[in-house]
Amino acid sequence: MAIYSALRDGIQHTVYKIIDPGVRAVVKIGVTPNVVTTLGMVGNAVGAAMLVYAALYGEPGEYSMIGWAGVVIILSSIMDMVDGYMARTADMCTTFGAFYDSVLDRYCELLTLSGLAFYFMQTCMPWSAVVTFLSLIGSIMVSYVRARAEGLGVECKVGLMQRPERVVITIVGMISTGFLQGLLPFDSIWCVVAGQCVIALFANVTAFHRIIHVKKNIHE
């Protein structure tokens, strides 16, 4: 776990170094972290709309729109790193900004996973839709348990399947489905389904792990 945390922190630090010049440039022209947060949610909404479009109007068995939706969502998700880094480096941290960022993060996940679930329902993959709903439930509960715990004064960041991991798994599955079609020995749609299976399992495990963690710390 310590190795994983160190690796995650190292990747995050590297990304911050890469985006630093761009962040400082947009701060100079007056862009605020809340604007970046809003743009990130709008991008996720566009990605979800692309999934709905693919479900309603796409050719059966043609997944390129899912791949492009994944590209739009990953670009939008980068905003989630940019807004926090911008707030810290430009001394723009506010209580409302932190609240606004957390709320829109939940909207982003709901939009993406709802779009995937709708796609599966429309393309006669009901069990994949069920798995995606379980993924959505786990994702929301991981965040809710942490928020509720911190409201009780208990720090609660334990567990493997936090938001960055969930976003990466979802996007890798979508991009693989869209752009590896015909290159795999199986139907590439199973890439995104497999990702949702992983999230459905481990996000809910993480939520219960956090419940146990809170119980232990409240008892102490």
Image: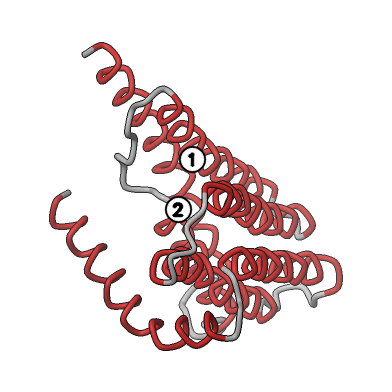
Mark 2 — residue?
163
Q: Whole-percent x and y of residue 55?
A: 79, 66
Give 215 or 207, whichever is nearer the viewer. 215
Asked if disc 2 and disc 1 are in contact, CB closer than 8 Å, the reply is: yes
Decide: few, some or many residues near mark 2? Use Cα within 10 Å; few <14, some 14-19, many ≥20: some
Mark 1 — residue?
143
Give 113 or 85, whichever is nearer the viewer. 85
Judging from the image, the colouring scheme is secondary structure
Q: Whole-percent x and y of residue 172?
A: 47, 70
Determine whether the residue tagged by mark 1 lies in a helix, strand or loop: helix
Sequence-first disc among 2 and 1? 1
Q: Residue furthest left?
A: 3
Which amino acid does the dot numbered 2 rest on?
Answer: Arg
Determine whether the residue tagged by mark 2 lies in a helix, strand or loop: helix
User: Which quadrant of the structure image shows residue 37?
Assistant: bottom right
Q: Taking 73 as reference, is 131 above or below it?
A: above
Which amino acid does the dot numbered 1 rest on?
Answer: Ser
Q: Whole-percent x and y of residue 165?
A: 40, 58
User: Which quadrant of the structure image shows residue 101?
Assistant: bottom right
How many marks the image carries: the answer is: 2
User: Which quadrant of the structure image shows residue 215?
Assistant: top left
Image quarter of the C terminus: top left
Q: Whole-percent x and y of residue 199?
A: 46, 49
What residue is rendered at 46% in x and 38% in y?
Answer: 142
